[in-house]
Image: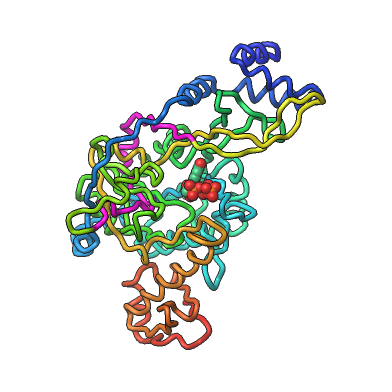
Amino acid sequence: MMNEEEVIESFSDLGQDYLFDCWTDWDEHKKSILLEELASLDLKLLSSLQKCLPEKEVPPSLSPLPCLSHEDIIKMDKERELGRELISGGKAAFLTVAGGKGSRLKFKGPKGLFPISPIQKHSLLQIFAEKLLAAEIHYRVPLFWYIMTSPANHAEIINYFRKNSFFGLAEERVSFFSQRLNPSLSPSGKLYLNPAGTILKNPDGHGGVIGALIQDGLLTHMVKQGIEELFYFQVDNPLVNIPDPLFLGVHRSMGAEVSSKVIRKISADEKLGSIGLVNGRAGIIEYSDLNEESRYLRDKDGNLSFSQGSIAVHLFNVAFLNRTDFVLPLHQARKKEEVLIPGSNGCILKEVEVIKFEKFIFDIIPLAGKAVFYETLRADEFAPLKNKSGVDSIETCTRGYIEKYALWLEECGVHVLRDEEGRSIYPIEISPLYALNREILKKKLSHTVNRINDQALFI
Ligand code: UTP
């Protein structure tokens, strides 16, 4: 570990001496915290971030790529059976990324704790926990769940699980691990100090999950447990279909190293990553990277050429994760942040433009020997919670939740009262512990409920 002079000297040599101009009126304790942080900063990482600053990302060559259609998938009975065997045999584990800041939602606390279910007001994480518990009961198998947090929400998420007795799951099968942070930089490569006087950093993106799993020994843990496939999903989609034997079975029978779920985009402008051939390899192109020409391109039948969007649900083969040397690219995002700047009378707070560096999980797809894109239905599996209001908001997510289960009930022959716009009049919530999937619901209902004519239906 470097001493104080060495830290100051080495960061001055790196052109970062202005950091020390900020601390003229600080006490020794505050100075020592910054010095310690600087002494442990990964200089290789800093230099690699600085190196990619001036790079203008070369636009990739893009061409359309078909996916496995939903119509074909639902007929794959052998694959569904294979998926069931994988689950019952304990070969599948689950991974949730919950490290994001969730800034658009403006919720006090980690996004995973947001109470989203329409009647019971269960949180996103409780909904997933109950789906996994229901799957354990149904398949009579212990399942492992890995949850990526960030340093900012790690303790709160763990405490939440403890306070709620892990929602019935076995504590030893739920692993929490924190994602890493990257320093945020000025456009010229300078470090910034946040208002507390420590280095301004940001979570390293959902793509940071692979590095964190490796560094924390969790991939090794999976191998030891005999886990062969890892089911990835985000914390913000309560409709995610887990454990989904059909998805697992199709992925496995096709020999895929990565499989990703996609849905038909509502319009060319829907902000979903599109699937395609990216520089000749199967991949997902971020919405903002799909140039206008490709975005509106139509095939001879008038359909969008890039018609399928990613819902950020993936399967990763564990041997593939273990085998591959993952160097995922860094993406830059410019954001306004309050930082400390040296002024004539000590330091002042100022809002400046900072560059954040993140990795994206879907950049793993082109590294796979075989990648499969698997079409599913929006109504059944996708209602993301991103914003407080408007698109992908609390309201649309709750509505998506109600409509999913309204459809399930109708498939079971239950009459659901709907308004002129076709929306269920009453809120509906079906606990995963009552029915994990529509087949179970069909068996359980068997004429006990055939009409929702009360204020709401919760079963
Ligand atoms: P988003 O890209 O929607 O970001 O994350 P966010 O942080 O949740 O929300 P905003 O943009 O600040 O409003 C998609 C998923 O990836 C996870 C999030 O927790 C969410 O499940 N994520 C994102 C991470 O785990 N780490 C990150 O660094 C970024």
Q: Is residue 354 above or below residue 273?
A: above
Quadrant where the N terminus sits is top right
| Magenta stretch contains residue 316 | yes
- Residue 270 placement, left or right of 66: right
**Residue 68 % position (x, y):** 22, 54
Residue 362: image location, x then y, percent: 36, 42
Q: Nearer the viewer, residue 111 or 94?
A: 111
Residue at 50% over, 23% down: 50
Evaluate whether residue 174 shows in this view. Answer: no
Q: Is residue 170 visible?
A: yes
Q: Provide residue 69's location: percent of width, then percent of height.
A: 22, 58
Instruction: Examine the rendered structure and indicate whether residue 371 appears above or below residue 161.
Output: above
Residue at x 71%, y 20% (from the top left corner): 20
- Name the colour scheme: rainbow
Report the number of numbered marks.
0
Occupied quadrant, residue 246: bottom left
Depicted 62 relative to depicted 66: above or below:
above
Q: Nearer the viewer, residue 458 or 358?
A: 358
Is residue 12 one of those drawn in magenta? no
Residue at point 36%, 63% (across, down): 378
**Closer to us: 396 or 118:** 396
Left or right of residue 233, residue 190 in this image: right
Chain part drawn in magenta: 303-332
**212 relative position to 121: left or right:** left
Hey, which quadrant is residue 227 in on the image? top left
Residue drawn where x is 27% and y is 40% of the image: 62
